[in-house]
Image (cartoon, rainbow, N blue to C red):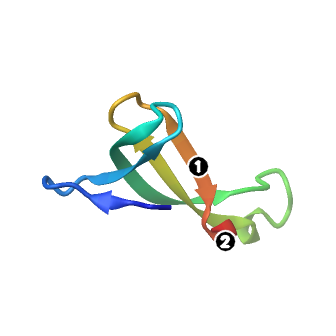
Amino acid sequence: MGAKRSADSQLVERCDNCAAMTPHHVIIKIITENEETQNAAFSREPYRITECQQCAATRKQRMNDM
């Protein structure tokens, strides 16, 4: 993933949209993948969601796929 912390403690990562290393806001969120099924309570997965602070592009990646 290649993330670094900048001097003001923002997470700096490569943004594919900007084609550069930029500050990002990063959160981990539990997302229900199959809401319409009977077993929706069992289809919750953690996702890492990043937002570029320069261009506002977002990326969502399933944590189990990292």
Most distant residue in the top direction: 55
Left or right for 36, reference 55: right
Left or right for 49, reference 65: left
Q: Name the disc covering residue 25, or none.
A: none
Query: What residue is pinned by disc 2?
Result: 64
Name the quadrant containing residue 32: bottom right
Which residue is located at x 76 percent, y 53 percent? 35
Residue nearer the viewer, 65 or 27: 65
Q: Secondary structure at mark 1?
A: strand
Q: Secondary structure at mark 2?
A: helix
Q: Position of residue 48 (x, y in %)?
A: 52, 58
Q: Quadrant of the C terminus?
A: bottom right
- Which kind of residue does numbered mark 2 sit on? Asn
Query: What residue is pinned by disc 1?
Result: 60
Residue nearer the viewer, 28 or 53: 53
Name the quadrant containing residue 61: bottom right
Q: Position of residue 34 (x, y in %)?
A: 79, 55
- Position of residue 31 relative to residue 58, above or below, is below
Which residue is located at x 32 percent, y 61 percent? 4
Q: Residues within 10 Å of mark 2 (few under 14, many from 20)?
A: few
- Position of residue 16 relative to residue 36, above or below, is above
Which residue is located at x 44 percent, y 47 percent? 14
Name the quadrant containing residue 52: top left
Q: Position of residue 55 (x, y in %)?
A: 40, 28
Structural distance between the alpha carbons of marks 2 and 1: 12 Å
Which residue is located at x 77 percent, y 62 percent? 40
